[in-house]
Image (tube, coloured by chain):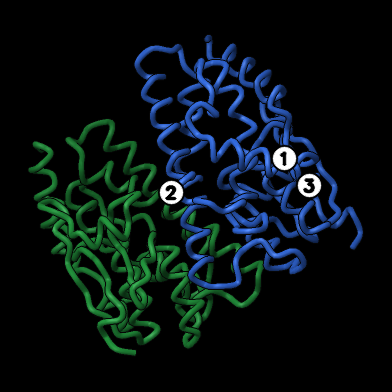
Chain colours: A green, B blue
Amino acid sequence: MSKTNNVLLGFPTSPFCARVKLALAEKGVDYEEREEDLFGGKSELLLKSNPIHQKVPVFLHDGKPLLESSIIVSYLDEVFTSNPLLPTCAYERAQARFWTDFIDKKVFETMRGIWLSKGGEEQEVAKKDFIEILKQLEEALGEKDFFGGDSFGYVDVIAIPLTTWFLACEKFGAFKVEDHCPKITAWIKRCFQKPTVVKSLPHPENVYQFTTQLRQMHGL
Amino acid sequence: MSKTNNVLLGFPTSPFCARVKLALAEKGVDYEEREEDLFGGKSELLLKSNPIHQKVPVFLHDGKPLLESSIIVSYLDEVFTSNPLLPTCAYERAQARFWTDFIDKKVFETMRGIWLSKGGEEQEVAKKDFIEILKQLEEALGEKDFFGGDSFGYVDVIAIPLTTWFLACEKFGAFKVEDHCPKITAWIKRCFQKPTVVKSLPHPENVYQFTTQLRQMHGL
């Protein structure tokens, strides 16, 4: 397949774009990456492809737009069947979708309450919620190496990019995830032994710099 | 399959429980329905099956709990292959999941801003948002009979139960959906010609009575 048939409209520090990059790397699919100017002007292609939400990631597969990172990863897993991510058992697939939904509803918004905060009571509540969410994820992980079991799977692709925002939360929230969540910390280290993870995800320091700029934009 | 192997923990006016009932009716699957006492005390089975969210619907398939209505409907479609709901084409399936995500994020919460409101500016904003959301859904429907195309499909199962809450919104918000959204209105009538829809969904008058009680509980 020609590289230019597949285009990812993305943004460097977005954990949602990183999910799509990681799934594409796991599947060995070539694509062209175009960085969107989210604060200046979004491209015509982005606005045309995602008129409802007008946000990244958009993945154009042979020109056809796919939207919402979790849905894009699921689509890629259905279309590119090598190196399967979702479980083959329907019940386990439903459980993977449940944890994806849980992560999508909870993690990013709760982290925002930590790094985009003046501190004080509000930030303490967000930190408490965040640790609680991670502990629930630790229970889902159990004694497995990955959320996918013995091998890296769908929920791992969904979850690991969000961990690149942990450093920013830790710096602005003055705490360490590893002090509370040893299993999640070990899982992160395990994931980062995979070259596909290393090459697809933003560096936590870059995310931290980006959140610093966002805080300034919000007058913090 | 014995009826008692499949149990739905539900609530009569819940549009999310109605999705599961409707999918089960479309698939011709027998099950036992148990009404939860959401305001008194939830059953041990509910709390054990859904410890994270502690909410209905829960569908126990041969004793194994499935959670989150959209995910349950997707699971049922994978396991009971007669009368397929999701499209066979991966791209169309991704689009169906996109609109499901859109509906899940927007419709119920926006309706809540209408029926659970003192009126005034806040309610006007919610009404405007609600009509805008329905117009976006009308564009997705286009000239098709159903969101699924010629036949009733996954997005129809996801969306139609929510329309049983329209009457409550119209009464408390003093407007008529049909004055703004003729295509959605025609689609609702088309769906209600199906016996599976009629038998699975709460009656709008019952939903209206229920919202009246909820308003009283909120001191409105």
| Alpha-carbon span between mark 2 and mark 3 | 31 Å
- Label 3 crowding class (10 Å Cα cut-off): few <14, some 14-19, many 20+? some
The amino acid type of the residue labelled 2 equals: Lys
What is the number of the mark on residue B210? none
- Asked if the residues shown at circle 1 and circle 3 are in contact, with their CB atoms under 8 angstroms apart, the answer is no
Residues beneath discs 2 and 3 located on the same chain = no
Secondary structure state at the residue bearing disc 3: helix
Q: Which residue is mark 1?
A: B192
Residue B5 point in image, percent of width and height: 85, 57
Q: Which residue is mark 2?
A: A105
Secondary structure state at the residue bearing disc 1: loop
Residue A53 point in image, percent of width and height: 33, 50
What is the number of the mark on residue B196? 3
Can residue A111 be seen here? The reply is yes
**B204 versus B217 height, above or below:** below
- Label 2 crowding class (10 Å Cα cut-off): few <14, some 14-19, many 20+? few
- Asked if the residues shown at circle 2 and circle 3 are in contact, with their CB atoms under 8 angstroms apart, the answer is no
Report which quarter residue A4 is drawn in.
bottom left
